Amino acid sequence: MSMEGKTVVVTGASSGIGLALVRYYAEAGANVVLAARSVDVIEAEANRIGENALAVKCDVSVESDCKSMVEAAVERFGGVDVLINNAGISMRALFDDLELSVLHRLMDVNFWGTVYCTKYALPYIQSSRGSIVGVSSVAGIHGLPARSGYSASKYAMQGFLDTIRVENLKKGVHIMVVAPGFTESNVRFSALTADGSAQGESPREEGKMMSAEEVASRIARGVRKRKSLLVMDFNGRATRILTLFEPRLWDTLFYKAMPNEQNPPSYN
């Protein structure tokens, strides 16, 4: 599938997977719309790419920002062919200790951000018979300890997008949910703790993770093949299978895994 002249909108485009997706599609000849709160970063990247890039400041938790972002994309490039809902935040804290405002923030960005952007882009994607992608996680396949809000928001995203797929079955709209494994990105450094502050460090060894560029390449390949679900690593595929057939075993494995992280929250 040639991307020449196609328009790709990427949320959370200022770093990590989002930035890698922007660069991938720009090199493939697509028009790219970079949506993020860090406007200085995305404007610098858009200027580097050139006239087929548009940077739009967008907080996906704000409905009017999402509407304005899609309108700006359509005004500049005439439509939307691919929407990649990549913007997201994570968390790490036991639910016992968690302030409920943290759950609201997770849902506002990860779930409602996907809903808002999809709502306003959908008519154009229906017209182009294009694609909507939701970047989820293994946490959207099975609940992960100390990630209650993150898992809940990703489950909600998947349920929403699965439903949109069914509703648009005869309209030629492609919907894909992506579950990368642990990826080199800023998401763990900015993950929220129990009181809503950023944890500021990663609990895992970043060097052993899949690169953002590799994840972006696989997402683009999934869009070309119009896949419905893309699970990227062995742990994700095993989680999906064993959750169906041995859910209690998988509960135990995840329970035992969390203490192996750096400075883990204590179950006691």
Image: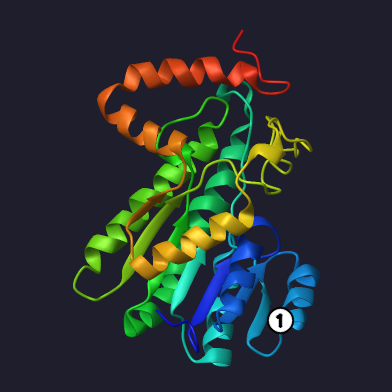
- Position in image of residue 173 (x %, y %): 30, 72
Residue at x-position 45% and y-position 74%:
82
Identify the residue under disc 1: 49
- Position in image of residue 239 (x %, y %): 39, 32
- Depth check, front residue: 186 or 265: 186
- Depth check, front residue: 156 or 12: 12
- Residue 81 shown left or right of residue 55 in the figure: left
- Depth check, front residue: 132 or 231: 231
Residue at x-position 79% and y-position 75%:
44
- Residue 128 shown left or right of residue 68 in the figure: left
- Depth check, front residue: 124 or 237: 237
Mark 1, other Cα within 10 Å: few <14 / some 14–19 / many ≥20: some
Residue 66 in sight in this render: no
Q: Amino acid at mark 1?
A: Ile
Q: Residue furthest left?
A: 170
Residue 35 in sight in this render: yes
The quadrant in which residue 268 appears is top right
The quadrant in which residue 175 appears is bottom left
- Position in image of residue 6 (x %, y %): 48, 84
Residue at x-position 59% and y-position 63%:
62
In the displayed structure, would residue 262 be above or below residue 114?
A: above
- Position in image of residue 249 (x %, y %): 36, 16
- Residue 42 shown left or right of residue 25 in the figure: right
